Amino acid sequence: MDFKEPSSKCIIQYGSLSRILLLFHILCGSLSLISSALSISSKKGQRTHRFFGKIYFWGMVGVFLTAIPLAIIKLNVFLLLIAIFSFYLASAGMRFAVNRRGIPKLIDWIAVILMF
């Protein structure tokens, strides 16, 4: 029998854990995509805008938490950086929504320094 080596560089082969992570990643991404469209289509400050904005944020948290191990498994630095940058933008949006006065707190400065 002729066994071929995997063509892509991977730390481990795509097992059931990787498939579960990928499925959850896709579900969270789909949820974020749909909720962002619903949030954008409602007026800013309305209850529906805030509700779908929170769903978007938590969906992006799920995308981030699944993208990190997937990027490590696949040795994909691009996916890792996109995950970090996307999470930063989603968390910055949530921080702006929560911090109505606009005065940055320590967590805001830490996030900016880490992204620099």
Image: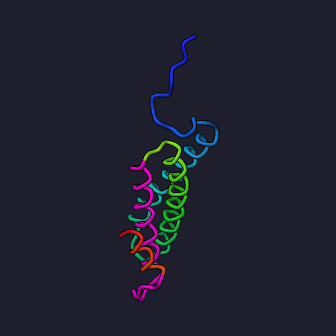
Q: Is residue 83 left or right of residue 2?
A: left
Look at 41% across and 68% down and name the residue there: 42
| Residue 9 in the figure: left or right of residue 23 | left
Q: Quadrant of residue 20?
A: top right
Q: Is residue 26 visible?
A: no
Colouring of the image: rainbow
Residue 22 appears anywhere in the view: yes
| Relative depth, front residue between 108 and 51 | 108
Judge whether 97 appears above or below 5 on screen.
Answer: below
Q: Is residue 71 left or right of residue 82?
A: right
Question: Which image quarter holds the N terminus?
Answer: top right
Q: How many marks?
A: 0
> Is residue 29 placed above or below 18 in the rendered structure?
below
Main secondary structure of the magenta stretch:
helix
Residue 96 image position (x, y, % from top left): 42, 78
Could you say which is closer to the camera, residue 44 or residue 61?
61
Looking at this rendering, what residue extends furthest in the right direction? Answer: 16
Q: Is residue 79 magenta?
A: yes
Residue, x 42% and y 85% (percent of image)? 104
Q: Residue at x 39, y 74 (%)?
A: 112
Q: Name the residue located 51 percent from the left edge and 20 percent from the top edge.
A: 4
| Residue 80 is covered by the magenta coloring | yes
Q: Give the residue furthest to the top.
A: 1
Residue 81: where, in percent of width, then height? 40, 56
Q: Residue 30 in the image: state x and y as whole percent.
A: 49, 50
Magenta extent: 77-106
Query: Quadrant location of residue 116?
Result: bottom left
